[in-house]
Image (cartoon, grey):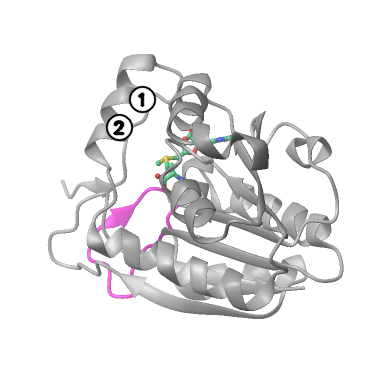
């Protein structure tokens, strides 16, 4: 039987989370994704803009952005206390510009704990973990509403490549489907900015990711 490409996570388990954070220290490819997001933020939000990161995890993207953009204010959303604890420690020097909201992205009103206006909502490697295309679409819709009139949405996440020869877990789906649901959620001119670590023949669960952009 062919494998299903995906990963099993225990994000509420301290030991698993510490191991995950050690295993996934950013590689050059992931830094390329972080830099795509950085460059989009630099050109589209005010210097003191407000940024929400969905599924902040150990805080690698947050650290990259907070170092590079010294005026932004940052909100990290995650449902995992051990992840938030690791991120809090990593980002200690930025604590004056950083708040955490512990919430489930699908089941809880995470946006309610964030001061408006929000200039950007971003995420990497997280929304596929919501378990289905329907849940990703739900979050895309909430993001479109939270960004109101003038915001940017950037999601760098795992996809199912068009030429896939394996099944993929349901949170990983095709680029065209992401663009379709971003447009349906209310984003204008949704586009795919980059595809990274494309691998068709023998993919691991940490390959095949893309960065999507939507403007309100
Ligand atoms: C694979 S990790 C990626 C972490 C980080 N974004 C990165 O790129 O290094 C996914 C993160 O999303 C969080 N997460 C997964 N499902 C979630 C949900 N339903 N609500 C809130 N956070 C969730 C996990 O706790 C974890 O921190």
Give, as a single range, the part of the protein colored magenta: 158-172
How would you rate the neighbour count of disc 1 (Cα within 10 Å): few for under 14, some for 14-19, many for 20 or more? many
**Which circle marks residue 17 in the picture?**
1
Q: Is residue 81 above or below residue 69?
A: above
Question: Does the image show residue 84?
Answer: yes
Residue behind mark 2 = 20
Residue at (50, 48) in percent of width and height: 62
Asked whether the residues under the numbered discs 1 and 2 touch, taking CB atoms below 8 Å apart as contact, a structural biologist would say yes
Q: Is 163 within the magenta?
A: yes
Q: Outermost residue toward the bottom?
A: 189
Give the image location of residue 131, x and y in percent: 50, 42
Q: Which mark is residue 186?
A: none
Magenta stretch: includes residue 167: yes
User: Local crowd at mark 2 within 10 Å, few (<14), some, or many (≥20)?
Assistant: some
Most common secondary structure along the magenta stretch: loop
Element assignment for label 2: helix
CB of residue at label 2: within 8 Å of ligand 1?
Answer: yes
Q: Quadrant of the C terminus?
A: bottom right
Residue 196, horizontal then vertical, whole percent: 31, 69
> Does residue 147 sit above or below 55 in this rendering?
below
Report whether residue 170 is seen: no
Q: Quadrant of residue 191?
A: bottom right
Q: Position of residue 133 (x, y in %)?
A: 56, 53
- How far apart, in angstroms, are the residues tagged by discs 1 and 2? 5 Å
Q: Residue at x 70, y 70 (%)?
A: 45
Near-viewer residue (164 or 21)? 21
Does residue 11 appear to the left or right of 43 in the view shown?
A: left
Q: Examine the image and state in which quarter residue 101 appears.
A: top right
Label 1 CB less than 8 angstroms from ligand 1: yes
Element on which disc 1 rests: helix
């Amino acid at each position: 039987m062919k494998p299903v490409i995906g990963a099993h996570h225990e994000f509420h388990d301290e030991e698993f989370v510490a191991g995950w954070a050690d295993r996934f220290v950013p590689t050059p490819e992931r830094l390329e994704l972080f830099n795509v997001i950085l460059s989009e933020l630099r050109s589209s939000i005010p210097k003191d803009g407000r940024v929400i990161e969905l599924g902040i995890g150990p805080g690698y993207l947050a650290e990259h952005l907070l170092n590079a953009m010294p005026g932004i204010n940052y909100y990290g959303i995650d449902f995992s206390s051990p992840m938030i604890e690791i991120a809090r420690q990593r980002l200690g020097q930025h604590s004056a510009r950083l708040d955490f909201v512990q919430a489930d992205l699908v089941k809880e009103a995470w946006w309610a704990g964030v001061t408006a206006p929000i200039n950007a909502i971003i995420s990497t490697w997280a929304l596929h973990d919501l378990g289905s295309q329907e849940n990703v679409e739900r979050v895309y819709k909430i993001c479109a509403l939270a960004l109101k009139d003038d915001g940017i949405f950037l999601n760098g996440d795992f996809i199912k490549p068009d030429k896939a020869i394996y099944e993929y877990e349901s949170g990983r789906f095709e680029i065209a489907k992401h663009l379709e649901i971003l447009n349906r959620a209310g984003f204008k001119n949704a586009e795919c900015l980059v595809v990274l670590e494309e691998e068709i023949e023998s993919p691991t669960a940490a390959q095949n990711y893309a960065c999507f952009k939507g403007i309100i």
